[in-house]
Amino acid sequence: GNIATNAGGNRAVKYGTTRHQVYSVEVVNPTGRIVNLGARLQKQSTGYCLDQLIIGSEGTLGIITKATLKLLPKPKYALDLLAIFDDRQKAMGVVTKIIKAGITPTCVEFMDNITIKSVEKYLNESLQGSDHGNYVIVEVEGTSEDDLDDKAVTLDEVCTANGASSVLVADHNKIWQARKAFAEAVRAESLIVCKEDVVVPVDQEAALLDEILHLAKKYNLVTRIASHAGDGNIHLNILKNEDATYEDWDARVKANQQELYKFIYAHGGRLSGEHGIGYKRKQLMEEFTDPGELEMMKAVKKALDPNDILNPGKIFDLDD
């Protein structure tokens, strides 16, 4: 499942998504043939990269029955820092400055203030800076304690110079409990939620956040925002207004999507960073994907699955 969906997460900024951890896969293709794709090699240029085509194809091109994965040593030294920003834009804008400072963080996560308060209410405990602050959580790994200290000093300086009101060494369990409670906190507020998973180049992330907030105000939408800020992936949850009918809310959400996706694609982004397309987003996929790119995808699907038996109607519909 992880391989078929190319699952991502908060450590993608350093380690990449699932596809970066896979050497090879054994696949049952749509005709019933068992094929082995890829190899346990650091590099190879031998024909098409079919293993990577299968990875992330959401079960539409083959069933993965075996995989050879890469293993990396667990780092001995790691540190979590919490930078609190009064200004959301400055918080989001610090990501590129961290990278330019020569630091490759393991994670860079963002939570806006209203989301922090939502999590605080859900956990029933007070969180640092929740009165007005926006969070940037940075996890960094080091080769030694001295190396880790040097990186912490640099991160402190970069965040402070970019407007952080405070930079703290965070309690690992507590800060990640708060970040990971995001989805449950949203669900506790509303059972009717539109979950957006948009992604742009990291240097466009602050502009995207601005646009999200602008459109939320325009369409009277209730938002909760968290982000894998280190790789440009923003999780926008749009909660149904308590006083609105579903039909009214749904119409406003769809109008918001049209403007939001046009902005995202104009700034080099895509409509899904890690959640994928499936059935829910396939019409939006058809609408916003470059026609030539979509034509190639459909041609691959028709060639490998001529009877359309693997996850039909997912990602896109085949032309008659």
Image (tube, rainbow, N blue to C red):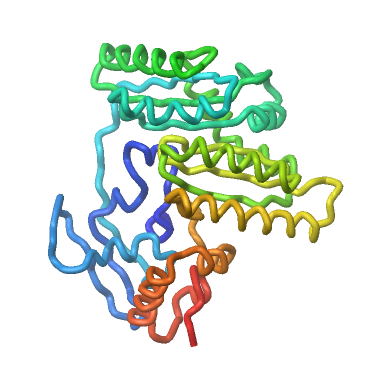
Residue 60 visible, this angle: no
Classify residue 67 as left or right of residue 241.
left
Placement of 138 over or under 304, stated as above or below: above
Placement of 309 over or under 69, stated as above or below: below
Residue 11 in percent (x, y) is at 39, 37
Residue 230 in percent (x, y) is at 42, 35
Residue at image location 23% in from the left, 68% down from the top: 36
Residue at image location 36% in from the left, 73% down from the top: 296
Placement of 195 over or under 30, stated as above or below: above
Placement of 65 over or under 241, stated as above or below: below
Q: Quadrant of the N terminus?
A: bottom left
Classify residue 210 as left or right of residue 255.
left
- In the rendered image, the residue lying farthest to the right is 243
Q: Which of 108 and 183 lies nearest the eye of the viewer? A: 108
Q: Quadrant of residue 49?
A: bottom left
Residue 298 in percent (x, y) is at 40, 76
Residue 95 visible, this angle: yes
Residue 86 in percent (x, y) is at 59, 20
Residue at image location 67% in from the left, 37% down from the top: 185
